[in-house]
Image (cartoon, rainbow, N blue to C red):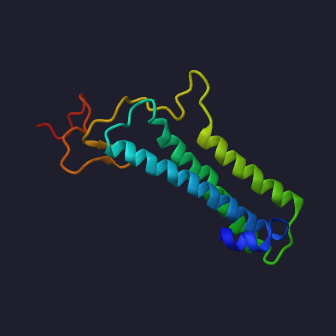
Amino acid sequence: MAYRAATIGYGRLTNPQLSIVLGLTTLVIGSTLGVIVQILYATNNLNEQNGVLIGAHASAQVGGYLILVAAGLAEWILNPGGRRTRGGEIQSWLLFLAGLTLATGRPRSGSTMGRADRGPPCRDHDPLHGPRAGSTRHAGPDDHRGAG
């Protein structure tokens, strides 16, 4: 896709094409963050300080990729063969920058958005997918469900 966009040239891309190219750029950034999180987890180096990468990964994937590509697809379906407009270009770039801001932004003081509030993960719990099979540590200390 990037090769085709480069051969077409930036000035000749339609609004949907621009949205897809920018969305795929954000996909690469978000996926790279996800791989870094998994490497940190696999090497048992995921802690509270670098655990914010989990939120950055999710924000980049949703805020930067899914919304931007969905906007491009919607415009392509609603206006097939339409020419590029200044408003569509601005919309694509603003959604791209919003996705990057979500992925790289720091929370305001007092905000818990993007923080790993639960402390370092235990080895029986995958922060992205929940408790591992056979784990006994998924119930909290006050959780007495099933106790007879």
Which is more toward the observer, 99 or 47? 47
Q: Is residue 53 left or right of residue 69?
A: left
Measured as percent of width and height from the top left, residue 49 is found at: 45, 30
Q: Residue at x 25, y 37 (%)?
A: 139
**Quadrant assignment, res 126:** top left
Please indicate, yes or no, whether residue 20 appears anywhere in the rendered image: yes
Q: Residue at x 84, y 74 (%)?
A: 82
Which is more toward the observer, 46 or 16? 46
Q: Residue at x 80, y 69 (%)?
A: 9
Quadrant where the C terminus is found in the figure: top left
Measured as percent of width and height from the top left, residue 28 is found at: 57, 57
**Quadrant assignment, res 113:** top right
Residue 93 to residue 69: above or below: above
Quadrant where the N terminus is found in the figure: bottom right
Measured as percent of width and height from the top left, residue 102 is found at: 62, 42
Q: In the rendered picture of this protein, how many numbered marks are placed on residues?
A: 0
View extreme (top): residue: 110
Which is more toward the observer, 69 or 6? 6
Q: Is residue 10 left or right of residue 128?
A: right
View extreme (bottom): residue: 81
Measured as percent of width and height from the top left, residue 37 is found at: 43, 45
